Amino acid sequence: MNTSDNKATLSFSDGSPSVDFPIYKGTVGPDVIDIRKLYAGTGKFTYDPGFMSTAACNSSITYIDGDKGELLYRGYPIEQLAVNADFMESCYLLLNGELPNAEQKATFVDTVTKHTMVHEQMQFFFRGFRRDAHPMSVLVGTVGALASFYHDSLDINDAKHREVSAIRLIAKMPTLVAMAYKYSIGQPFVYPRNDLSYSANFMRMMFGNPCEEYKVNDVLVRALDRILILHADHEQNASTSTVRLAGSSGANPFACIAAGIACLWGPAHGGANEAALNMLKEIGTVENIPAFIAQVKDKNSGVKLMGFGHRVYKNFDPRAKLMRETCYEVLEELGLQDDPLFKLAMELEKIALNDEYFVSRKLYPNVDFYSGIVQSALGIPVSLFTGIFAMARTIGWIAQWNEMIADPEQKIGRPRQLFVGSTTREVKPLDQR
């Protein structure tokens, strides 16, 4: 973080003295005005609902340029990582700042693999949930509960403890997600296997059963691996900010990640791919598309186009192009090109890319649109889509949490407010109210 030669000057029309603030330059992106001394110097706060103009931290992990459609993990474009690296390499990169060499990768993969089992008593914890509980509510509970099983690594000021907790979270999330699925359908839990890759292991835990050996399909495993890479981190979004805010109090990492999962569950955040697929099911058939499009264009209808456009990426979502490739690969591998749902999705994609209404508003298909289709094709139920997202994003959360704990400038999060309620009042006795 370099201080600029320029300063920002805040002046007041009421005759109060003006105040200068330092300006910092990041390696890329907009300059940042340091207003930490604003309240002490002026007795005033800034007002910024949603923190849309506020940098709450400095970070060297992920950078997004929404106008350019650019997403970088530690400086590497997502387009290159998705093609030239697997999810484990991306995890290593996000945690450590550099891509691993062959030896470092082998050690990292081996360490993660040997932590994939969860404590056997977790089985009894699962039995406390209703069978029809939403997988995200199960994950909030089970991930938070990990702190009760692994309390030997909860000293957040010990770098080794933080490292062990990070590995445990990355390793155990697929096991917990698969357990949540198996529990909901009444099938026995499938234990992880150390001879399979991270993504193949997850597919087997999801779809294997004791009656027959699960056959690993490399195309489908690669598709899941790409979903995980593309969702691994996304800068200071709502769930990541939640993890950082929870962590700023000194809460243990399992509690912080559980808080992130709770935030991700919201339909405006992690639930977008679930909403996109539900939208396709509601449209029903290709014949119903024109009527649906007409409703979308009618502002009074209340019908929204889910899985299109992005509030950060103004021109295109760089992850969507990669997910689209994977989508077509998976549909071809499984022979689903003629499946009514997928034909409907492809027709809707074609219209959105050519209709002036959508093109002019930059309502292009985003990563959620394609990842929902891919996950559905893989056999993952809609209710578990956000669970897969949480599994992918855990590495981003834990990397951001780790960075925050090690940041000497970090303080407990304490946003201010613009108070608009009653001034001081007297409490009257009950018989006088």
Image (tube, rainbow, N blue to C red):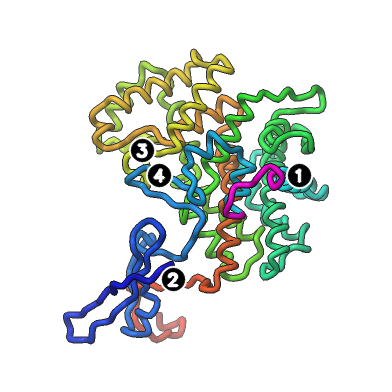
- Residue 377 seen by the camera: yes
Based on the displayed image, in which of its 4 quarters is residue 132 positioned?
top right
- Going by the image, does 309 lie left or right of 188? left
Q: Which callout, 1 or 3, points at the residue further toward the start of the chain?
A: 1
Q: Nearer the viewer, residue 55 or 45?
A: 55
Give the label, 2 or 4, closer to the camera: 4
Distance between the alpha carbons at the discs numbered 3 and 4: 9 Å
The disc labelled 1 sits on which kind of residue? Asp
The question of residue 296 being in magenta is answered with no
Based on the displayed image, in which of its 4 quarters is residue 68 positioned?
top left
Distance between the alpha carbons at the discs numbered 1 and 4: 32 Å
User: Secondary structure beneath disc 4?
Assistant: strand
CB of mark 2 within 8 Å of CB of mark 4?
no
Give the label, 3 or 4, closer to the camera: 4
Q: Check disc 4 and report the residue beneath it.
A: 70
The disc labelled 3 sits on which kind of residue? Phe
Could you say where residue 130 lies in the image, as x and y percent from the top left?
69, 43
Q: Check disc 2 and report the residue beneath it.
A: 415
- Give the residue displayed 28% in from the left and 32% down from the top: 358
Q: Check disc 3 and report the residue beneath it.
A: 316
Q: How crowded is mark 2: few (under 14 residues within 10 Å), some or many (20 or more)?
A: few
Q: How crowded is mark 3: few (under 14 residues within 10 Å), some or many (20 or more)?
A: many
Q: Check disc 1 and report the residue beneath it.
A: 110
